Structures are given as structure tokens and as C-alpha cells.
Image (cartoon, grey):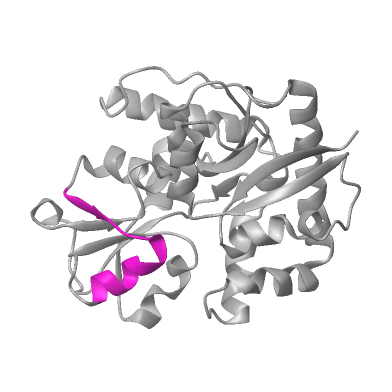
Amino acid sequence: MVDEIRVGHTPDADDAFMFYAIENELIPMNNFRIVHHVEDIEKLNKRALDHELEITAISAHALAYLSNYTILMSGGSFGINYGPIIVSKEKNSLDNVSNGVIGIPGYMTSAYLLMTISLGKQKCKEFLFSDIPDAVFNNLVDYGLIIHESQITYESQELHKLFDLGQWWNKTSGGLPVPLGINVASNNLMNISRIRDFDELLKNSIQYSLDHLEEAIEFASKYGRGTQRSVLTEFVKMYVNEFTLDMREQGKSSISKLFELAHEKGIIEKNVPLKYSR
């Protein structure tokens, strides 16, 4: 029996790279028929509140507002001493950050939570993540919290890095990977056996792309937003790493640490229950 399931992932090169073999059915599909829902991460975070999809990518931060989900071991986005950065148009410091407005990719994103843990609550304005560099350059906001390929291209947009949240996290956490995006399965819509089957499928898809790098990058370039192929490849290699295939105990520890710090700072009031596929 084939199960048709809805799977949410983002219009980003790293997600497209991971789903290359699944979308093109280049590997055994474990009796799944996939209906792809490709949307911005903050939209997926909000859709997860109502269990609209069987499987979805979400920000790790979004777990604080969800219930009855299982975290997959594969497909996570973890930075290794790198992560979201704060930029500005001028070469200045963060000394006056509280007097300005920061463009952010969403209040449920992990980037926002990391920034709030490190700098406290700030005045923010939401933008589609890809619009933040232009918003900073055009003086719509004073600072920008940037994610995805903008972390590599911001200098070409005449912006300046003020703060690297990945490096801050590395020091704060004692060297754990930076927890950014994860994949979760709705326990309302799937049983644990099939959740594990999909987890295996996604891991196999990621491994296929790593084994067929050039063709998978070519496929992923449809979400490159005009980014040069070399930059796109660098970005994919940054966020499809050893913890993407399997987050292992280090990945689990990093997610726990994120919520521990957020709870200590009073940003998240409750303890967040974490259930993994294995």
C-alpha cells in the first residue's frame, strides 16, 4: 500500500538539494507518494500549528509553540561555528542596536531566537528572508538578521557584518552545532513506524545528492535566486553537513541547549518536550 503524504520544505537550495532524489524518485520511495508544499520557512512554521502537513521543515524555535510532533533525525540544518548574522549599511557596532529596528525573517525562526538570547528583545520588523538585505540597503531598517545564501553574499550588497550568531553560539554552547532548521512529523497524521520510514527515505535522498553532487546542485539551482553557482555550492555544503544526514546526540543536545537558554532568559516560559524518531 502506498501512502500519499504532504511534505513541506522551503524554496532554498539546501532543501532542494536534500529532496532531489525524492522529488525525482531516484531512490526506493518506501511506499510513499509525496505531494510537495514549497513555502517560506515562517509560513511552514505557522502551518505546523494546525498539523496541516504530515511532514514539514520548521525552525527549531517553532517547537516551542507546537505539540504532538516527532523530530526526524535527518534533514536538519545545523551550522558548524557559523550561522545567521546581523548586518548594517554602515560600518558601526551593535552598541546602539536598541535604538534601531532590525529586519528579521520571522518571530518563530531560530535566527530570531538566537538573536534574542544573545542581545535581548529588540525592535524588529518582519520581511521575507530574501528581502532583508535590500531593506537594510534602502534604509527601511537599521539592521538586518540574515540567513541562507545572504550570509555569503552580503558584502557584494555593500553591507557590513556586525555580529555572527554562529560564532557566539559556538562559544556559548561549548562547541555544539547551531540548531536552525529541522524536519518534524505530525503524530496526529502518521504513526511512528511510517515516520521512521520517511526519516530513512530522507536520509537516503540526502546521501544520494552527496554522492551525485553536481547534478543535485544543478537541480537545487532553481531556487538559487540568481546566486552564482560557486556561491550556491558553498552555501549547500555549509548546511548539508554531517548533522544533516543524522543529527546524532550532538544535534539533540544543541536543540536542548537552545531551549534551556531561552527558558533561563524568560523568552520561553515553559519547558519544551522533545520527541525524536529514534
Closest to the observer, 256 or 66: 66
Residue 128 sits in quarter: bottom left
Instruction: Point out the image quarter for the N terminus.
Output: top right
The answer, for residue 174, to whether it is visible in the render is no
Residue 150 drawn at (x, y percent): 43, 68
Residue 232 sits in quarter: bottom right
Instruction: Point out the image quarter for the C terminus.
Output: top right
Residue stretch in magenta: 123-137
Q: Residue at x 76, y 67 (%)?
A: 216
Residue 65 drawn at (x, y percent): 41, 28
Residue 266 sits in quarter: top left
Q: Predominant secondary structure in magenta?
A: helix
Q: Is residue 137 above or below residue 277?
A: below
Decide whether residue 130 is among the magenta residues: yes
In the image, taking residue 26 as reference, residue 40 lies left or right, namely: left
Q: Is residue 257 above or below residue 28?
A: above
The answer, for residue 198, to whether it is visible in the render is yes
Residue 195 drawn at (x, y percent): 74, 29
Q: Residue at x 33, y 23 (%)?
A: 263
Q: Residue at x 39, y 48 (%)?
A: 111
Closest to the observer, 48 or 131: 48
How many numbered callouts?
0
Closest to the observer, 34 or 264: 34
Q: Is residue 267 above or below residue 168?
A: above
Decide whether residue 131 is among the magenta residues: yes
Q: Residue at x 62, y 79 (%)?
A: 230
